[in-house]
Amino acid sequence: MRGPSGFRPMETIRSVSENIAFVREEIARAARKAGRSPAEIRLLAVTKTVDDDRIREAIAAGVDLIGENYVQEARRKIDLLGRPLPWHFIGHLQTNKAKYAVRLFDLIHSVDRIDLARELDRRAAAQEMTLKILVEVNVSGEASKSGVPASQAITLVRSLAEFPCLSIRGLMTMPPWFDDPEEARPHFAALRQLAEAIRREHIEGVHMDELSMGMTNDYRVAVEEGSTIVRVGRAIFGERPV
Ligand SMILES: *Cc1c(COP(=O)(O)O)cnc(C)c1O
C-alpha cells in the first residue's frame, strides 16, 4: 500500500536492505518510463541522524554513496566508517566549516555564494587538490530556501568558474514541500533547463553533468525530469526523530 506520494506507510517498511531494493526498483521504473537508462541515476543515501549500525547495513546492502548535512556529525561517522565510498555534503555549509568540508567530502552539493566558494577554493589549494562542487539553485524563489536564485545562477557559475581549485559538475535543488510530488515537477524541469542554458554558454571548465534532485517524497518525478543523483533518507532509514 502506498500513501499519496508513493511513500509507503511506516508499518510496511522492513529492513534497510529491503527499503534500498525497493527504492532502486522505483528509480529504475521511473527511468524507463522516461526513456532513460537506470544506470544514469545514482542513489545517495542521506544519513543525517541515522545511527552507525544502520549506515553499515546500508553499505552492506550495496549503497555506494552517502550524503550528510552536518560537518561535525559527518566527521565522526567518516572517521568510524571510513572512506572506501564517497561521502557528499548536502546541507547548508557555513564558510567557517569549509576547511573540514574540503577534506571530508568528494562532492559539495550546496555551493550557493561567492564567499563560500572563495574559501573552499583557498582550502582546496592548500591541500593541492581540486574540489568538485554543485551549485545549489533556489528554483522556487521561496525566501526561506538556500540556493542562488535561478535568475542569478549563470552569473554565479561564471564567477565560480574563475576559481582554479573548484570544479563545477552540475546543479542541485530542493523544491518546496508538496503533498503531491507532481507539483515538484516544474521545479525539477526548471533546474534541468537551467543546466542546459548554462551548458550552451560553454564556460571553460564548467561541466553540467549532474542534476542533484529528488528526495523521499518526489524522487520518482525527479528521475523522470532528468535527475542524476537522488538524495533519499526516510525511504531507506525510516522517519527521522524530530
Ligand atoms: C534530509 C535531506 C534529504 C533527504 O530527505 P528525505 O525526505 O529523508 O529523503 C535530501 N536532501 C537534503 C538537502 C536534505 O537535507
Image (spheres, grey):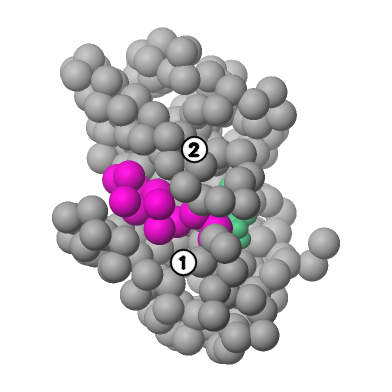
At 67% from the left and 85% from the top, the residue drawn is: 11
Image: 160 above or below 68: above
Q: Which residue bears the numbered disc 2? A: 173
Q: Which residue bears the numbered disc 1? A: 83
Q: Residues within 10 Å of mark 2 (few under 14, many from 20)?
A: many
> Viewed as shown, does residue 198 lie left or right of 85?
left
At 40% from the left and 63% from the top, the residue drawn is: 43
Q: Quadrant of the C terminus?
A: bottom right
* Highlighted magenta segment, given as a residue range: 216-230
Does residue 52 appear in this view? no
At 47% from the left and 47% from the top, the residue drawn is: 182
Image: 62 above or below 175: below
Residue 227 included in the magenta stretch of the image: yes
| Residue 189, x across and y down, in percent | 36, 35
- Number of on-image labels: 2
Residue 53 included in the magenta stretch of the image: no
